[in-house]
């Protein structure tokens, strides 16, 4: 494995730091992903089919969270709707937009009002688990993450959320 | 409200609900009117429900409309593996309104989205049964003269009873005080109580039925089912505590009426049936007027 050492410029503060996952020239860094959610983020953003450079690290040391995952996507910037999808699987994630190896913007993810077709209804008797229907949920509690199914009207709590 | 599907009671505003009740009064005075002669109503009962289906069909027949449909999924193309979507799209070609009962929760909402005729939900699994709720509101208003500021007791299975959940939510629009009587295991779920709290209304919880009877205007009884209990001994312990007998009504208020969505098993003794407080059979009859009002309104003839 090739080791990369370089200057990583973040906001105004310059820090010298060894990068475990190499830097990208242009694109988006999705940082502070809970380690267990890294592959879920890849799936939700369809990055498994991405044809440009994609750098992934997981179980990396993090001062803030102990362990974290990171995904760097060359030449790709995400729409707000895509960013909100990340919020459901990785609420602690932050996005850093890079141009010419420099940080041009930072964004935190936020939980959306609606969740369309990425979550499976936990109620086995819900029609969405029988017919081929795009699921739809209303976020009824953003803090504790509670979703209400548009169809069966049952509420799913955070720990019971299953992604499609 | 022409062409407006009714899937969940909250699909209709308080004003729209009251409009249906007012219209139902008109049909109670004059139940046979040939105003649906040019209409076809489909009743799709993917699971059997004699009472609800007959009530809808009676309502259509009294208004001169035609009914098509099935009363059991085994006699329909569902048996051949047809999807709900395909069934609904097909039936939309043949009818002006679909009344549907289906064992899966959310099926009626889905049907209302795929079809191009309005849908009335006649029960989707354990989720919603809004016409039951409307007929309950009608029965309460008729017996009490008003829906406002009443003391209403719900008795029995408050956890799983969908009629209880919908009616509690609907009554929060009318400043009711709620008296919730149930075994500990079958208490009203917190997401339903939240609707009461959100409107700053009072509710009281009891485990003893006798305690509540002298204070209420409506006693809404429901059945406690054995299969709801994980511990069969617990069921044996509580099953008789929520049976209403004639003598228990001795100290009731003069205006008290006993309601029950039916079918009853043993939670109301038959010796209550002939007492002036018993209203559950009349309540079922009110279902016909309310369904006449609802269908006439959705089809745009009233």
Image: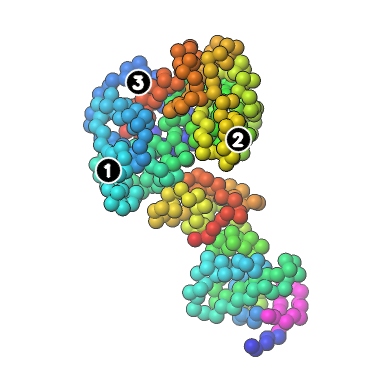
Residue found 56% across the figure and 50% down from its top: A156
Q: Position of residue B251 (x, y in %)?
A: 60, 12
A78 shown above or below B175: below
| Chain at tag 3 | B
Dot in front, 1 or 2 = 2
Q: Position of residue B110 (x, y in %)?
A: 40, 47
Secondary structure mostly taken by the magenta-highlighted segment of the chain: strand
Dot in front, 1 or 3 = 1
For marks 2 and 3 on the same chain, the one whose residue lies earlier in the sequence = 3
Q: Position of residue B54 (x, y in %)?
A: 32, 29
Residue bearing mark 2: B234
SS category of the residue bearing label 3: helix
Colour scheme: rainbow
Label 1 and label 3 in one chain? yes
How many angstroms separate mark 1 from mark 3 (CA)? 33 Å
Of residues A157 and B71, which is closer to you in this image? B71
| Chain at tag 1 | B
Q: Quadrant of the N terminus of chain B?
A: top left
Q: Residues within 10 Å of mark 1 (few under 14, many from 20)?
A: few
Q: Residues within 10 Å of mark 2 (few under 14, many from 20)?
A: few
Using the rendered image of the protein, determine whether residue B149 is visible from the camera's viewpoint. no
Q: For residue A26, what is the image quadrant? A: bottom right
**A10 part of magenta stretch:** yes
Residue found 71% across the figure and 85% down from its top: A5
SS category of the residue bearing label 2: helix
Residue B27: mark in rendering: 3
How many angstroms separate mark 2 from mark 3 (CA)? 46 Å
Label 2 and label 3 in one chain? yes
B134 shown above or below B269: below
Q: Read off the magenta span.
A: A6-20
Residue B75: mark in rendering: 1
């Amino acid at each position: 494995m090739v080791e990369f050492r370089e200057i990583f410029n973040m906001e105004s503060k310059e820090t010298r730091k060894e990068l475990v996952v190499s830097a990208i020239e242009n694109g988006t860094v999705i940082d502070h992903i809970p380690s267990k959610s890294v592959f879920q983020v890849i799936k939700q953003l369809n990055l498994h089919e991405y044809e440009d450079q994609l750098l992934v690290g997981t179980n990396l040391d993090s001062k803030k969270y102990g362990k974290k995952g990171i995904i760097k996507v060359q030449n790709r910037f995400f729409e707000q709707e895509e960013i909100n999808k990340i919020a459901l699987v990785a609420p602690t994630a932050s996005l850093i937009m890079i141009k010419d190896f420099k940080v041009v913007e930072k964004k935190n993810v936020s939980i959306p009002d609606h969740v369309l077709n990425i979550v499976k209804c936990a109620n086995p008797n819900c029609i969405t688990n029988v017919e081929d229907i795009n699921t739809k949920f209303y976020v009824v509690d953003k803090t504790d993450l509670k979703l209400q199914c548009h169809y069966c009207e049952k509420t799913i709590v955070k720990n019971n959320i299953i992604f499609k | 409200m022409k062409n407006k599907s009714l899937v969940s009671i909250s699909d209709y505003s308080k004003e729209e609900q009251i409009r249906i009740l007012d219209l139902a009064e008109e049909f109670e005075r004059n139940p046979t009117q040939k105003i649906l002669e040019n209409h076809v109503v489909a009743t799709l009962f993917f699971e059997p429900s004699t009472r609800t289906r007959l009530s809808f069909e009676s309502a259509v027949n009294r208004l001169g409309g035609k009914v098509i449909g099935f009363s059991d999924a085994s006699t329909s193309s569902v048996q051949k593996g047809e999807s709900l979507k395909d069934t609904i799209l097909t039936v939309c070609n043949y009818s002006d309104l679909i009344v549907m009962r289906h064992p899966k929760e959310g099926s009626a909402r889905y049907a209302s989205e795929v079809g191009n005729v309005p849908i009335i939900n006649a029960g989707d699994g354990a989720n919603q049964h809004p016409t039951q709720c409307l007929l309950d509101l009608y029965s309460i208003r008729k017996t009490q003269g008003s829906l406002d500021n009443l003391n209403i007791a719900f008795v029995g299975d408050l956890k799983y009873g969908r009629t209880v959940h919908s009616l509690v939510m609907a009554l929060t629009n009318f400043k009711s005080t709620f008296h919730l009587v149930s075994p500990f295991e079958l208490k009203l779920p917190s997401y339903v109580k939240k609707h009461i709290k959100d409107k700053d209304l009072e509710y009281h919880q009891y485990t003893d039925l006798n305690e509540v009877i002298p204070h209420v205007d409506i006693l809404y009884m429901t059945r406690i089912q054995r299969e709801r209990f994980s511990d069969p001994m617990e069921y044996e312990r509580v099953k008789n505590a929520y049976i209403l007998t004639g003598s228990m009504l001795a100290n009731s208020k003069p205006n008290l009426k006993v309601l029950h969505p039916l079918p009853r098993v043993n939670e109301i003794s038959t010796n209550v049936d002939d007492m002036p407080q018993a209203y559950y059979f009349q309540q079922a009859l009110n279902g016909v007027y309310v369904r006449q009002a609802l269908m006439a309104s959705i089809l745009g003839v009233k």
